[in-house]
Image: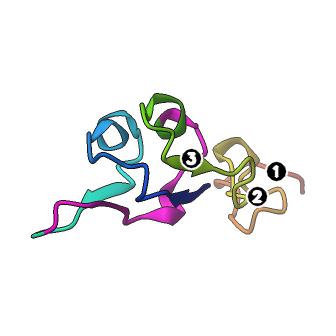
Amino acid sequence: MIERIDYDKCDQCGYCLEVCPSDVFRREPGSGRFYIAYLDDCQTCFNCELECPEGAIRVGPFRKERPQAWDCGRGSGFPLPAGRGSG
């Protein structure tokens, strides 16, 4: 997950907004400053950190566990489709 944006380094170039596949970033109206609007949507892909020319974004190596589509019904809390599974 994204840990922080270092606003002392950030030059507001907008690369983070362009490269994020989850659309996590937004620009503040008025100031134009970028911020992390949807942290829970971060996929920890590191695109923003890798593409930031100023090194202003820090992404941590861990993210929250999310149920995977192929794990449905196997302890994920989601039921298996009808006719699937044991029993």
The answer to whether mark 2 and mark 3 are in CB contact below 8 A is no
- Look at mark 2 in the image and give the residue it sits on: 73
- Look at mark 3 in the image and give the residue it sits on: 43
Observer-nearest of 3 and 9: 9
Observer-nearest of 9 and 76: 9
Q: Is residue 77 above or below residue 67?
A: below
Residue 39 highlighted magenta (yes or no): yes
Left or right of residue 13, residue 42 in this image: right
Residue type beneath disc 2: Gly
In this view, the mark in front (3 or 1): 3
Q: Which residues are magenta?
A: 31-47
Question: Residue extending furthest left?
Answer: 30
Q: Where's the C terminus, which quadrant? A: bottom right
> Reading the chain from its start, which is encountered first: label 2 or label 3?
3
> Reading the chain from its start, which is encountered first: label 3 or label 1?
3
- Look at mark 1 in the image and give the residue it sits on: 85
- Disc 1 on helix, strand or loop? loop
Q: Is residue 16 above or below residue 81?
A: above
